[in-house]
Image (cartoon, grey):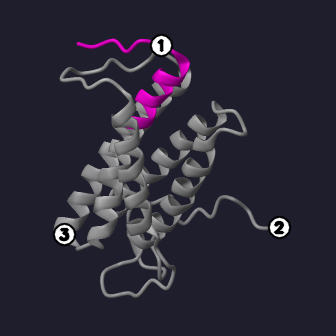
Amino acid sequence: MNKIYTKTGDEGMTSIRGGIRVPKDHPRIEANGALDELNAMLGVARTLMPADDDRQVFLTAIIHELMMVMNHVATPVGKQNPKPLHVVELTECMEKLVDEVQAKTTSTRHFILPGGTPLSAHLQWARTVCRRAERRLWTLHREEPLNPDILKFVNRLSDALFAMARDEMERAGVPEEEV
């Protein structure tokens, strides 16, 4: 039986794709940690949706793609990653979703307080984690260039999460609180 613990990280080092050892606070690890946290947050949001909710399919696709993105982020510069990314297609889907939500919700020039429903609050929370992941990706990108489509994907994902949170409020009939 394989054990979950390996003891190989006890001295503050971990492995990235290809078995290369890096410090646990390396920008590549920080970026992937934030993406991993985002993925967990999206999993929580999914549990708050009815099983037949159309948003389930969308979030499931995003969660799967974030796993591929993390795989690519874990790949050091100069190494080829054979796993396909679908970030361009999903970025287009997110733009369409944002446009659809904006067309049916009232325009606002104010900040919107998170909350309203548990799902909306969790989508807003995921949005903030997404923004942190994006910052960590840009830190890494300045040192070791990433696929720019990954950066666009994560940027658009935060917009889509904001739109989804607003859409949830609309569906639930709960008024947004503006600041």
Q: Which residue is drawn at 33% across and 17% down?
A: 113
**Which residue is tagged 3?**
143
Badge 3 or badge 1: first in the primary sequence:
3
Residue to which mark 2 is pinned: 1
Q: Quadrant of residue 31?
A: bottom left
Q: What residue type is labelled 3?
A: Glu
Between 104 and 19, the residue placed more toward the observer is: 104
- The answer to whether residue 14 is visible is no
Q: Position of residue 16 (x, y in %)?
A: 45, 72
8 left or right, relative to 161: right
Q: Can residue 83 be seen in this view?
A: yes
Marks 3 and 2 sit apart, C-alpha to C-alpha, by 39 Å
Per the rendered image, the range of residues in magenta is 163-179
Secondary structure type for disc 1: loop
Q: Is mark 2 on a helix, strand or loop?
A: loop
Residue for point 72% across, 38% down: 51
Q: What element carries label 3?
A: helix
- Where's residue 118, x and y in %? 55, 21
Q: Is residue 53 or residue 39 the one in the foreground?
A: 53
Residue 90: mark:
none
Q: Nearer the viewer, mark 3 or mark 2?
A: 3
**Mark 2 to mark 1: distance in Å?**
50 Å
On residue 174, which mark appears? Answer: 1
